[in-house]
Image (cartoon, helix red, strand yellow):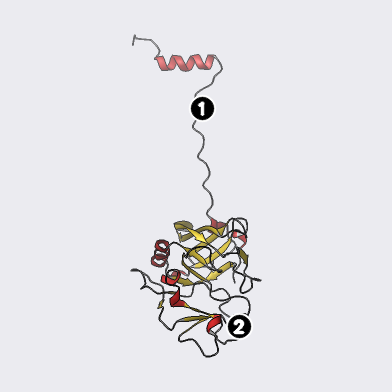
Amino acid sequence: MRPGAAPAALLVCLSLLALGAGPPSAAPPPAPTAVPLPARMADTGDGTQLITAVAADTRSTTGTLTWWDRRGGRWVAAGSAPARFGANGLADGATRRQGTSTTPTGLFRLPYAFGIRPAPDGTAYPYRPVREDSWWCQDNDSRHYNRWTEPLSADCRATEAEHLITYREQYAHALVVAFNYRAPERGRGAGIFLHVNGSGATAGCVSVPAADMRRILRWAEPARRPHLAIGTREGATAITRH
């Protein structure tokens, strides 16, 4: 470059300014980060772990299940999986009725896990093995309504109960969902679980692929009080505890 000559790049910039083009524009600001669903929810169960199961609308039989950790004051997704819901979609957990093949919406505790197969390595949750005489009573006339009974109690009709070991695929691994569980109301529904996929939609439970169910059991920590929130895209932020 000759002494006193302007650099070529400077000449280009000066020419652009002379033409009114202005200086080169700055890079656009980054797009705002989406607020995670748990941070937008009215209630997450007062724990530091949460599972959300979200369908497009109440008629949907499929959706997405995501499990979340709260660390450093922020909710972070730890994993997700495709989910299945009841054959007749979702129903408000406060008014849902037994035998409707709907999955109840709401925020629920997860009291314990169970399964026909042994608990996956690393499982911290209380885990109950399914035996030949393990049943879940759904008989509205039984004092064991919406409870595990082993063996089948005398006041619970076998036709109104699930013989758990017969569902070898679905109940290979599962978590009990505390819908209508603390003080069961007859006719509202019984035997709602988070379990492994069967051949299609469920009878009212939430199901995920087998590998994802194992991941959830390894991830869940009872001391962190995980809950399951079930809802629709539009209604998820207003989910209430049941």
Q: Which residue is mark 1?
A: 25
**Image quadrant assignment for residue 97:** bottom right
- Amino acid beneath label 2: Asn
Above or below, 52 against 1 in this view is below
Instruction: Give 137 or 77, whichever is nearer the viewer.
Output: 137
**67 versus 32 height, above or below:** below
Residue at 53% from the left image edge and 49% from the top image edge: 34
Q: Camera-side residue: 102 or 14?
A: 102
Give coordinates of residue 40: x percent, y percent: 57, 57
Tell me the crowding category of disc 2: few under 14, some 14 to 19, or many 20 or more residues within 10 angstroms, Cα based: many
Residue 207: image x %, image y %?
Answer: 49, 65
| Tag shown at residue 15 | none
Image x and y of residue 82, in percent: 48, 57
Q: In which quadrant is the C terminus drawn? A: bottom right
Q: Quadrant of residue 145?
A: bottom right
In which quadrant is the N terminus drawn? top left
The answer to whether 133 is drawn above or below residue 20 in the figure is: below
Which label belongs to residue 140? 2
Closest to the observer: 86 or 118?
A: 86
Identified by mark 1, the residue type is Ser
Indicate the secondary structure of the residue bearing disc 2. Answer: loop
In the displayed structure, does residue 240 sit left or right of residue 212? right
Packing grade of label 1 (10 A; few <14, some 14-19, many >=20) is few
Q: Residue furthest right?
A: 95
